[in-house]
Amino acid sequence: MDANLFTSMLFATVVAGTPLIIVALGLLVSERAGVLNLGAEGMMAMGAVTAFAITHHSGSPWLGVLAGMGAGMAMALLFGVLTLTLMANQVASGLALAIFGVGLAAFVGKPYEAVALQAVPPIRIPFIADIPLIGEALYNQQLLVYFSWALFWGLLWFLYRSRAGLVLRAVGESPASAHAIGYPVIRIRYLAVLFGGAMAGIG
């Protein structure tokens, strides 16, 4: 295979996979807390259209990212109210939220179909980006690509090396035991769901 073709394919794979990595890591936290969130697609759609609209009107892509996180968290809060407060079925609520979010995003995003945004310039890491074959593909990327890598290692430490991560996993694996020793199970699950929504909004 031609070296340039390999680099281009690897670059495209990293770009396409980054949103999925961020969303999957957010859902991992929710799953570890014992909440099955199948509404991530709706959260992603609402986060995307909100981020696009805010970026278009403000001219700031980072303000758009924050707005996307907010939209994802709003959808996650709705999911949390349905499943954690009202005790609705998690699978049914998640699927309904996914359909609702995708439909609402399509409706809200209709005015922006013909709008184009200026691409954010990539961040090139000196010296490392000069590595043959993989350097340009991995180390000449958008900030969110590097964020996804940091998020992976950060969550790995949080879940398996921190007390808070241990509590989170305890809530997911044995909520009755966690409640018996004084941990606020519902509150912890809400925080986990909101974090998952924020990551879906970024994705």
Image (tube, grey):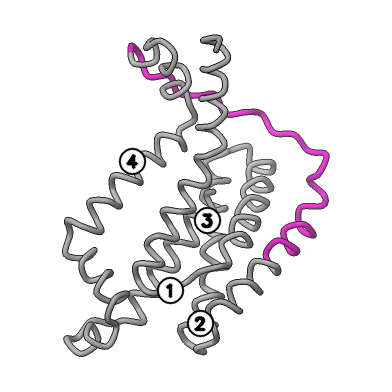
Report which residue position mark 2 lands on.
83
Contact (CB < 8 A) between labels 3 and 1?
no
- Tell me the SS state at disc 4: helix
Q: Residue at x 32, y 74 (%)?
A: 172
Tell me the crowding category of disc 4: few under 14, some 14 to 19, or many 20 or more residues within 10 angstroms, Cα based: few
- Helix, strand or loop at label 3? It is helix
Q: CA distance from mark 4 to mark 1?
A: 24 Å
Foreground pick, 102 / 9: 9
Label drawn at residue 35: 1
- Whether tag 4 and tag 1 are in contact, CB under 8 A, the answer is no
What residue is disc 4 on? 150
Does label 4 or label 3 sit earlier along the sequence?
Answer: 4
Q: Residues within 10 Å of mark 1 (few under 14, many from 20)?
A: many
| Stretch of the chain drawn in magenta | 101-127
The image quadrant that residue 168 belongs to is bottom left
Q: Earlier in the sequence, mark 4 or mark 1?
A: 1
Looking at the image, do the residues carrying marks 4 and 2 touch, with CB atoms under 8 Å apart? no
Q: Earlier in the sequence, mark 4 or mark 2?
A: 2
Q: Earlier in the sequence, mark 2 or mark 3?
A: 2
Asked if the stretch drawn in magenta spans residue 157, the answer is: no
Question: What's the residue at 46%, 21% (across, down)?
Answer: 140
Q: Which residue position holds label 3?
A: 200
Q: Which mark is residue 46?
A: none
Amino acid type assigned to the residue bearing label 2 in the image:
Thr
Q: CA distance from mark 3 to mark 1?
A: 15 Å
Q: What kind of residue is marked 1?
A: Val
Label 2–label 1 contact, CB within 8 A: yes
Q: Amino acid at mark 4?
A: Ala
